[in-house]
Image: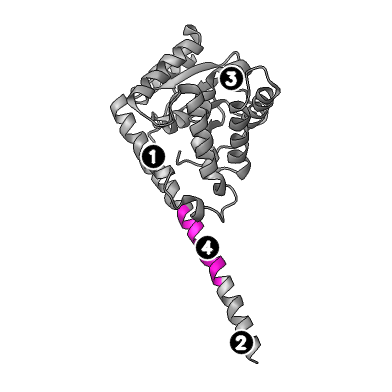
Amino acid sequence: MGQQASTPQPGKQLQVIGAGLSRTGTASFSAALAHPLDGPVYHGGTQTTLGDPIEIKSWIQIIKLWCSALPEEKETKSALAMMKERLDGYVAVTDAPGAQFTPELLSLYPDAIVICTVRDPIAWDKSMGQTAGLATMWFLSFVLLPLPGMRHFTTYIKALTAQWLRVYGKDWPSIELYHQHIAWLKKVVPEDRLVFFDVKDGWEPLCRALRKDVPDIPFPRVNDSAAIERVAQYHVRRGLLQWAVAIGAVAIGAGCVFWVGRV
């Protein structure tokens, strides 16, 4: 999160499923993948918070359909069709909610490789706790209401919570859940298709897994914590500004009515 939303390129095919949990370096990973794969990467956090409103609204619908159905039911098939449409034109998908849809994405893209970004579980738990707290602040639904896409943010967070409950049986980050996610991936992804990668290791292991040449540029380093905070501040400022404009317009209108009534 924290970068600009990516734009799909017609003809590009999904080659990598990023199965790492949020806050495991997914922003750096996404920025890096774009170079050896030569195409746009769909980073879930960035696309849903900085992309067109259809991004966040589509994923809410996809998750709701998926959570309400059994694997062979038409609702699940509809969710998969919507997912494929949303990812058309991208070379990779990373971050939530894609990471929790790894089996479904493998069914859609059988030739893709699954790469799970990892980090120290204790540091991850602390980082996720901070992010979860930020995403559930009580005033968000009110502040974000004037913004076309972000007015759905609290609904989106609830959808992600439901998705976690179905996948892990838990709805809050913990060290136990981190290890559970790794074990789950090893169960649902064939061993020869699953790669674990720490962004601290840079280009070499990543390009080896991708069977691509190492780019002649520094490996991208995106500070996830700072980026998330910037995005949050950006949307809160936008929401407050819209409320100020609306309240100001109402005040002016009321003042005009008052003075007209006195004339």
User: Residue placed farthest to the bottom in the image?
Assistant: 263
- Residue 131 is tagged as 1
Magenta stretch in the rendered image: 236-248
User: Residue placed farthest to the right in the image?
Assistant: 74
- Which mark is first along the chain, 4 or 3? 3
Q: Which residue is mark 3?
A: 104
Answer with left or right where residue 112 lies relative to residue 82: left
Q: Position of residue 90 (x, y in %)?
A: 59, 28
Rendered image coloring scheme: one colour
Circle 4 SS class: helix
Q: Residue at x 49, y 22 (%)?
A: 167
In 3D space, how far apart are the residues under numbered discs 1 and 2 (Cα atoms)?
A: 49 Å
Task: State the image quarter where residue 28 is shown.
Answer: top left
The amino acid on which the numbered mark 1 sits, given as a three-letter code, is Thr
In 3D space, how far apart are the residues under numbered discs 2 and 4 (Cα atoms)?
A: 24 Å
**Residue 35 in sight from this viewpoint:** no
- Which mark is first along the chain, 2 or 1? 1
156 is within the stretch colored magenta: no
Q: Which residue is mark 2?
A: 259
Instruction: Report crowding for label 3: few under 14, some 14 to 19, many 20 or more residues within 10 A (C-alpha).
Output: some
Q: Quadrant of the N terminus?
A: top left
Q: Position of residue 35 (x, y in %)?
A: 50, 27
Q: Residue at x 59, y 77 (%)?
A: 254
Asked if labels 1 and 4 touch by Cβ distance under 8 angstroms, the answer is no
Instruction: Report crowding for label 1: few under 14, some 14 to 19, many 20 or more residues within 10 A (C-alpha).
Output: some
The amino acid on which the numbered mark 3 sits, given as a three-letter code, is Glu
Q: Which residue is mark 4?
A: 243
Q: Main secondary structure of the magenta part?
A: helix
- Which mark is first along the chain, 1 or 3? 3
